[in-house]
Image: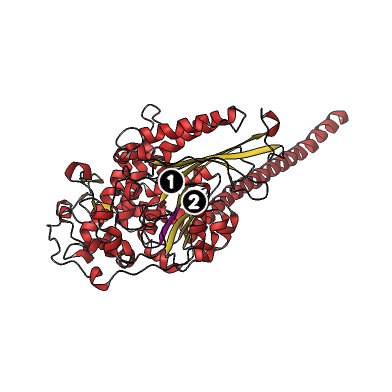
Amino acid sequence: IKWDQYFIVTSVVLVSVILAFSHKKRLLCVSLRTDTVYFHLPPLDGQQKCVYGVSCYRQMEAKVLKVREADITRETVQKSVCVLSRLPLFGLIQAKLQLITHAYFEEKDFSQISILKELYDHMNRSLSCTALEGSQIYLGLSARDLILHFKHKVLILFKLILLEKKILFYVTPVKRLVETLMTVLSLFPGIIEHGLADSSHYQPRRSISEDFSSAEIKSADEESLSMSTTDITNISKDLLDSECEWETLEPHVMDEMEGKVDITHLNTFDTDSGLPITVQPQSATGQGMLSSGLVSGLQEDQYGLPLAVFTKGYLCMPYMALQQHHLLSDISVRGFVAGATNILFRQQRHLSDAIVDVDEARIQIHDPELRKMLYLSTADLRFADYLVKHVTENKEDVFLDGTGWEGGDEWIRAQFGLYVHSLLSSALQQDHERLLADYGTAFTSAWKITHNYRVWISNKHPAMANITPGHPFQGQYSVADVKIRLSHSMQNSERGKKFGNAVMSTSRSVVQTGKAVGQSVGGALTVAKSAMSSWFSMLAQPTAAVSASSQSAD
């Protein structure tokens, strides 16, 4: 990669650069005229946090350029305008960057970078940490489209991440890949806003107290960093060359928290109406400020969220280049949620626990034990069916277009927020085994040994006393549950698919056989009818002949 231009960082936007792709090595498929990439980079300084990158790629014919530089030797030229930021405002940055990239290419002179300087200055003036508190952070991440495409499988993806498994998303183009992956993460309360700060780290820290002491925590607006071409190049080198292992938390930190909250259990699922009582917890901004987690180091709300999933070597890589392939098998990487467009990532199945084919909305899991953990309980199926029904019922509403509350993006995220809060609250109860059974016994047993659960349970969260424990869709079985289970099994299990195909094949055979039988019977009746007619005709002909000869004899 040739870094043509770079700018000195101020507060939010670290750098704005132009990437010129060489003809030997290209990060993106040149068959695409335009595409967008989201990516994460580790910081140059260990005290800093993850660097969030957005890149808009375009290509055009070289002959239309007003000024043709010496390095442009082919018929087409490919360049990408890239922004590195401290804030995970992917959709907002992409919307601005896409327009600027288009205008930059329309100049047909890549030496004219004034428009990029204006973009850099504008974003540093307009973007701040306050943008993390509103809905702008979810711009371009449609939870509705995710539910419409994956349906109840979204809950399986959700549980896979809670279990901190190695998950690979695969699809082209890159824009669809990264948006799908980030939309799944947006279902987790606070993950995108504050839970990705360590998602590109996999180097050990010396101690928790050194890394997360209050004296060293600075706001993004107070930090500044100057980056040169060499510094930017070193980002990729640091990401590729690090082979260090993470420390494990001290045993005493992981001890079960004392004095679990005892809350009277309430049934939150109305079996008559099929609707849950969705008492959604208030946002952190309404009941208290965020604080730095002692163990996780993340900015947490009063419920201990976001969960410390993407910490301690569990990586989030929205887009992985082929040069990062070795990270999938690195011993210091305990897991990942990654996106790739290269078929080589998909072919090496042994490096991933689950491969998500976005085009086919299919999740490939080869470990039977993991499949057992992800088996959706009846309550889970009710939850997923509830989401799908509310989203599909409103999908034709061209006026709301997903902006309404019920069935909209915010509503969907609120339901998953309730799911997580209820799950955590259930884990605190004296009869937690009974309450957690509705989430799946195998799943909850595996979840309790994950890093994010052990970090969360190691601290006290008094606000959880306000959350009703138990699955939001718990309740007695009904005929509707049997139908949901049957539909789920038919659509997803291999045996169900084979059975469904067999039924369809049998149905076609019955129809074809019926037609054939009908034709055979109809043909036989026609032949019989014709034979009878001929027989009667033959009987009639001799009689007529006899009559004629009698008349002539007379």
Q: Which residue is mark 2?
A: 231
Magenta part, dominant SS: loop
Tag 2 near tag 1, CB within 8 Å: yes
Horizontal and vertical percent position of residue 70: 69, 38
Amino acid on which the number 2 mark rests in the picture: Asp
Between the C-alphas of marks 2 and 1, the distance is 9 Å
Indicate the quadrant where residue 526 lies: top right
Residue 313 on the magenta segment: yes
Mark 2: give few (<14), some (14-19) or many (20+) Cα within 10 Å.
few
Q: Which residue is mark 1?
A: 226
Residues in magenta, as a range: 306-320
Residue 418: mark in rendering: none
> Residue visible at 46% across and 69% down?
331
Give the quadrant of the C terminus.
Answer: top right
> Residue visible at 16% across and 52% down?
463
Question: Relative to 546, is 29 on the left or the right?
Answer: left
Nearer the observer, 90 or 21: 21
Indicate the quadrant where residue 401 lies: top left
Nearer the observer, 205 or 444: 205
